[in-house]
């Protein structure tokens, strides 16, 4: 199966060779519009009407809908030139809106993957039902996201909501360091420094646990709009000597940091099913995460601890319990690795997607 990759925004994962849609010469967009109108004026107009309809209310959204339409005509031209037979979009965001318009013009079946709860928030959530209804199938990263998709559409569409895990390449992971037998534990937290990640609650829990209880250093990997606020709160709590802010790191650097840590903590208020949890468990790290969205589908008994979302006292208690269970860390790490091997491998996910693309009963 040949795959042509497109990225609306330039940049991203340099390991994936993708054609960028933005950042081209204005002549490229003008040529795509002329080509599309000349090739199929009826479909050109129907796709333009769809762009006008499939948007949030307001003047700004109306203007952006025209940008999406132009991008869609460019992708359509590239798709048909490349001999594509279908279009699949990751995330139900503005990129999926462009994909929907392109598939409508190119008369290609299209599908999408739902990853996290942000795809049900405004403005993406306002447009999600129509995307789901028009999709040939919807790959859901968790049963939780499948449930969110089901509640937005009539039961007639439920059969095309398929759980396809976000798998990882186990062979590409670095070697994991042995857990420390003695001395302070090293905690790692990976995530964007933004409100939904719950960093303030984690800092409160860390401040309530004495270093003598086994916690010396917290490594925070990530950057974001609340970076300054998180730094300031850590300073206010007197935690700067116990925290290393590593900032945004490349994937291989992040994996190496996880492999050198003892445990990974995710205090999120909102998630889908975080890939970083899968990676940490594959590296044999016990995890502590909030019992939210699809997380309990991954973190099961024996692989780590869960706490009640937003209950920072519960987070403190569970963190203290995990720090006190040092003798069980290796066993928990092995159980986590086994859980990932059973259901979260990249080859399994690729095989599932290939079957969906080939299944005429679904597509």
Image (cartoon, grey):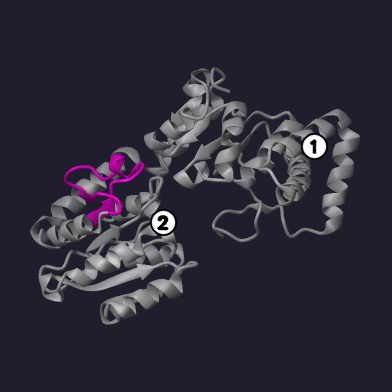
Q: Where residue 353 sits in the image (x, y, percent)?
A: 49, 33
Q: Which residue is mark 1?
A: 48
First to last magenta residue range: 285-310
Q: Nearer the viewer, mark 2 or mark 1?
A: 2
Q: Where residue 312 sits in the image (x, y, percent)?
A: 25, 58
Q: Which residue is pictured at 65% across the width and 32% down the height? A: 86
Within the image, what quadrant is residue 222 found in?
bottom left
Nearer-the-camera pick, 48 or 123: 123
Say if the magenta span includes residue 295. yes
Residue reaching furthest to the front: 58
Q: Which residue is pictured at 67% across the width and 36% down the height? A: 100
In the drawing, does residue 254 fall left or right of residue 62? left
SS assignment at label 2: helix
- Of labels 2 and 1, earlier in sequence is 1
Separation of residues labelled 2 and 1 (CA atoms): 36 Å
Tag 2: Cα neighbours inside 10 Å, few (<14), some, or many (≥20)?
Answer: few
Q: Where residue 121 sits in the image (x, y, percent)?
A: 51, 45
Picture layout, residue 283 above or below residue 98 = below
Say if the magenta span includes residue 311. no
In the drawing, does residue 192 fall left or right of residue 319? right
Q: Which mark is residue 190?
A: none
Instruction: Inspect this view and state whether residue 260 appears.
Output: no
Q: Which residue is mark 2?
A: 196
Q: Where residue 159 sits in the image (x, y, percent)?
A: 47, 21
The image quadrant where one finds the C terminus is: top right
């Amino acid at each position: 199966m040949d795959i042509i990759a497109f990225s609306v925004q330039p940049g991203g994962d340099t390991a994936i060779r993708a054609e960028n849609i933005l950042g081209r010469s204005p002549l490229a967009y003008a040529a795509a519009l002329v080509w599309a109108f000349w090739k199929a004026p009826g479909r050109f107009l129907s796709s333009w009407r769809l762009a006008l309809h499939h948007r949030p209310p307001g003047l700004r959204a109306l203007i952006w809908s025209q940008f999406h339409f132009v991008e869609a005509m460019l992708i359509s031209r590239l798709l048909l030139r490349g001999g594509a037979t279908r279009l699949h979009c990751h995330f139900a965001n503005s990129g999926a809106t462009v994909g929907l318009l392109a598939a409508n013009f190119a008369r290609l079946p299209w599908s999408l993957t739902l990853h996290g709860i942000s795809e049900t928030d405004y403005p993406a959530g306002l447009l999600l039902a129509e995307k789901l209804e028009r999709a040939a199938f919807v790959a859901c990263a968790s049963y939780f996201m499948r449930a969110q998709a089901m509640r937005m559409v009539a039961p007639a569409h439920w059969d095309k909501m398929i759980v396809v895990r976000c798998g990882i390449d186990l062979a590409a992971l670095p070697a994991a360091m042995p857990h420390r037998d003695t001395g302070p534990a090293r905690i790692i937290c990976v995530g964007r420094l933004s409100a939904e990640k719950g960093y303030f609650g984690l800092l409160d829990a860390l401040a309530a646990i004495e270093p003598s209880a086994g916690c010396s250093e917290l490594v925070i990997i990530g950057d974001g709009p609340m970076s300054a606020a998180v730094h300031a709160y850590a300073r206010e709590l007197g935690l700067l000597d116990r925290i290393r802010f590593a900032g945004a790191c490349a994937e291989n650097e992040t994996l190496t940091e996880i492999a050198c840590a003892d445990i990974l903590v995710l205090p999120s208020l909102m998630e889908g099913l975080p890939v970083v949890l899968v990676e940490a468990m594959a590296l044999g790290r016990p995890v502590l995460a909030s019992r939210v969205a699809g997380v309990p589908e991954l973190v099961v008994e024996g692989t780590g601890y869960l706490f009640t979302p937003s209950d920072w006292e519960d987070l403190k208690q569970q963190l203290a319990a995990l720090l006190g269970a040092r003798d069980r860390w290796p066993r928990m790490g092995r159980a986590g690795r086994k859980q990932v091997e059973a259901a979260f491998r990249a080859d399994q996910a690729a095989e599932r997607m290939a079957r969906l693309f080939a299944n005429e009963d679904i597509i």
